[in-house]
Amino acid sequence: MSSLDLPIASKRTSPQAPALKAKRSLGTRWISALTLAVLLLAWWLVTAAGWIEPLFLPSPGEILAKAWVLLTQGYMDASLWQHLGASLGRIGVALGAAILTAIPVGIAIGYNRIARGILDPLIEFYRPIPPLAYLPLIVIWCGIGELSKVLLIFLAIFAPIAIATATGVRTVDPAKLRAAQSLGATRFQLIRHVILPSALPDILTGIRIGLGVGWSTLVAAELIAATSGLGFMVQSAAQFLVTDVVVLGILLIALIAFSLEMGLRALQRKLVPWHGQSH
Amino acid sequence: MALLELERISAQYPGAAEPVLADITLSLGPRQLLVALGPSGSGKTSLLNLIAGFVAPSSGRITLDGVPVQGPGAERGVVFQDDALLPWQDVLGNVAFGLGLAGVPRSQREQKAREMLALVDLSGFGKRRIWQLSGGQKQRVGLARALAADPRVLLMDEPFGALDAFTREQMQALLLQVWQRTAKPVFLITHDIEEAVFLASELVLLAPNPGQIVERLQLDFGQRYAAGESARAIKSDPRFIETREHVLARVFSQRSAAQRQESA
């Protein structure tokens, strides 16, 4: 492969070299965009030149055409939207349930010694187990319906959020707590007005990590036991060697993970503008 | 008017052999500005934490108007060394925070908060974010926040310790004005000798191991400033210099005594 990269590399340096001289501080984003563009170009080149069989790697054009077919006609009795909707629905429900339960649990662990004693070992026990290792047990208990998949993702997301929340609660500035207490704050007011906002940056980081873990767990679970969803689409297409659907599915999975991450980062900037300020 | 009384207070950290404070008796009455001055380790901050109710004394009694102090409460406002403001609220929200906790309706508490901001010369800063303020401005917001809850006494924990010398002088002047206008008793701790002599209406000098009061002085430089005399005139007054040198000598005699004790 390295011999193939050479002509592209020389092509790439020629227009870029004067640009670098003209403006030394080329933005990092532009460098990243260029990397992507070069990668796409290489993909297109090796497929257009016929160096690689379409069975192993279809061309970008074929993938786009396939995407259109999937959107209009669907794959395995379900349109692309339905596969997408199934996956996003599962992770959405699991995330909602995890946020509603993990944040109170995290606050309890961080704030209360007894709650920490009870809950901390439970979470630390199941957290390091790869979710796919206990999927068989969940399938035995809850069957192969939606419940077991949602439950699996929920468990994967729950631990990072609960742990991040507990860390955030434990690292609240004691001076802020005392300030609120000397202004007459009750226990509940302390949690509501000081502890929760202080821990919010950590909670959002926990949600980001949890969502990343949850998304990979979801796709893996769909590869094993599902009749819809992006993971199922990729898996069943692979069994029939429909490579373009496989590649398309992988790209979509990556794209969604990327947008979730970016969306949460934007949310973090909006909700906690004080985070990282020199305060 | 409020009267804060400490009767034979001792305090000890859990597990420590030596007490941090031993046998402290103090009273803080109306129109008083009591300054506790001492080197680090003399238990200044512990003393303030006891009065604020953050920690409980191991023996002795603390009362405010005859009512024993049990835990922190809104009748004892505290200004902290590192402002301890809440960055998720703007300046106005921070100043109004205590009133919000007490259930005062929004328009009323914002009105009061604006009055307090005017009192500390920060009118028009209400919508600023906390991280957009300088160190001196943050301390003024901290002062306004403590005052907005209308405490009976104001406790200040080295409030100007982290500020540069120029800002510190401005803040001392501002504090004296606010003290004069609100007529609230103030308990302030510091390790800055000139600050202590300039501000105090009563100065107590603390010595370490264990923390104890070694001298009490009645002073009037702060009152003179509040009555209109200039800070420079007061600080170059021979009586001011004499007092400052006296306090300085006391602090150093303690320190050399402590060193002799250690080397012996």
Image (cartoon, rainbow, N blue to C red):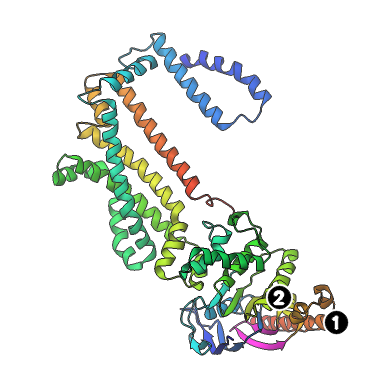
Disc 2 marks which amino acid?
A: Leu
Q: Position of residue B185 (x, y in %)?
A: 62, 81
Numbered range of the magenta stretch: B201-218
Which of B211/A229 is in front?
A229
How packed is label 1: few (under 14 Cα within 10 Å), some, or many (20 or more)?
Answer: few
Disc 1 marks which amino acid?
A: Pro
Please give the residue where the numbered disc 1 appears in the rendered image: B238
Q: Is residue B62 left or right of residue A96?
A: right
Which quarter of the rendered picture does the N terminus of chain B lie within?
bottom right
Question: Residue sitting at 30 percent across and 60 percent down?
Answer: A119
The answer to whether residue A29 is magenta is no
Q: Position of residue A246 (x, y in %)?
A: 30, 23
Which of A143/B42 is in front?
A143
Please give the residue where the numbered disc 2 appears in the rendered image: B176
Question: Residue sitting at 39 percent across and 65 percent down?
Answer: A111
* Magenta span main SS: strand
Q: For residue A119, say whether it is visible.
A: yes
Q: Is residue A124 above or below residue B112?
A: above
Sequence order check, earlier mark of 1 and 2:
2
Q: Is residue B180 above or below residue B162?
A: below
- In three-dimensional space, the C-alpha distance between marks 1 and 2, rounded to whole angstroms, equals 21 Å
